[in-house]
Amino acid sequence: MSQHPSGIHHLAFMAGDIKKHIDFFSQVMGCPLVALFDMHGVPGGLHAFLRMNDHSYFSIVQLPRVDEIPIELGVTHAGNGAGVSAPGTLQHLAFRADTEADLIALRDRIRSHGVNVIGPIDHGMCKSIYFAGPDQMTLEVATPGKLMDPAHWIDPAVLAKAGISDVEAERFKAPGAYSGPSPVPQPSFDATKPHMAYPPKAYEQMLATPDEVIMAAGSFTDPPVP
């Protein structure tokens, strides 16, 4: 039984105009639209899924008045792979291509839609192409290169720049397994831990609600079209 994520199920991006995003990621990127429905439990929300493979999807969310929120390069968006954005935001997204031939084929597909693409560039552990998506997305497609052996790809000088000690580095390279009981009860609220942004009273109530009650109240299992 794995105790770490096995991959990406879906990546969810906000859209001011969900149709524009669906058009880009289906036509330019070649990902077929497989789901579009009212977002579960979110009034006014629309939720789309485009297939990358049987295990991974690209997801788009549209919520009311999102199109009125300004995009600010250097704050909300990086704008390119070397640009800055606020902590916690996505600096760039790299899709996977299985082979170098697939990478070139995808580059050609993207360019055929009038979208400029830089690359490929060889980084050793991958070869990458770079381009932009709707709403100032910074996008990349990468194909695997040399296997990332930590002995060669973890730079001691950069560990020091990041404030990571040798002891911490060993721990980060080999995360310990959890061997305690299951299920683990909901921890008490600790302000030093990461938390989702909900109204405090509602969040406290959610944390106090048993998992099985949350599951029963919040689940939507039927597709929108019978």
Image (cartoon, rainbow, N blue to C red):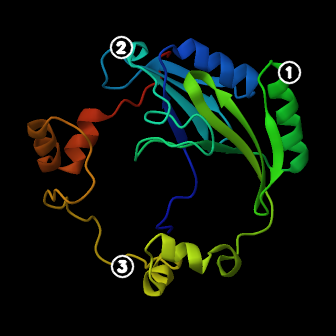
- The reply, left or right, for residue 182 in relation to residue 176 is left
Q: Earlier in the sequence, mark 3 or mark 2?
A: 2
Residue at label 3?
179
- The reply, left or right, for residue 222 in relation to residue 25 is left
Residue ID at (39%, 17%): 66
Q: Secondary structure at mark 2?
A: loop
In the image, which disc is placed on residue 156?
none
Mark 3 to mark 2: distance in Å?
Answer: 44 Å
Tell me if label 3 and label 2 are in contact, CB under 8 Å. no
Residue at label 2?
64
Q: Is residue 157 above or below residue 42?
A: below
Mark 3 to mark 1: distance in Å?
Answer: 52 Å
| Residue 104: % across, % down | 88, 40
- The reply, left or right, for residue 72 in relation to residue 93 is left
Dot 3 amino acid type: Ser
Tell me if label 1 and label 2 are in contact, CB under 8 Å. no
Q: Is residue 127 above or below residue 157?
A: above
Q: Quadrant of residue 125?
A: bottom right
In the image, which disc is placed on residue 112?
1
Q: Nearer the viewer, residue 80 or 20?
A: 80
Q: Nearer the viewer, residue 76 or 187?
A: 76
Dot 2 amino acid type: Pro
Q: Nearer the viewer, mark 3 or mark 2?
A: 2
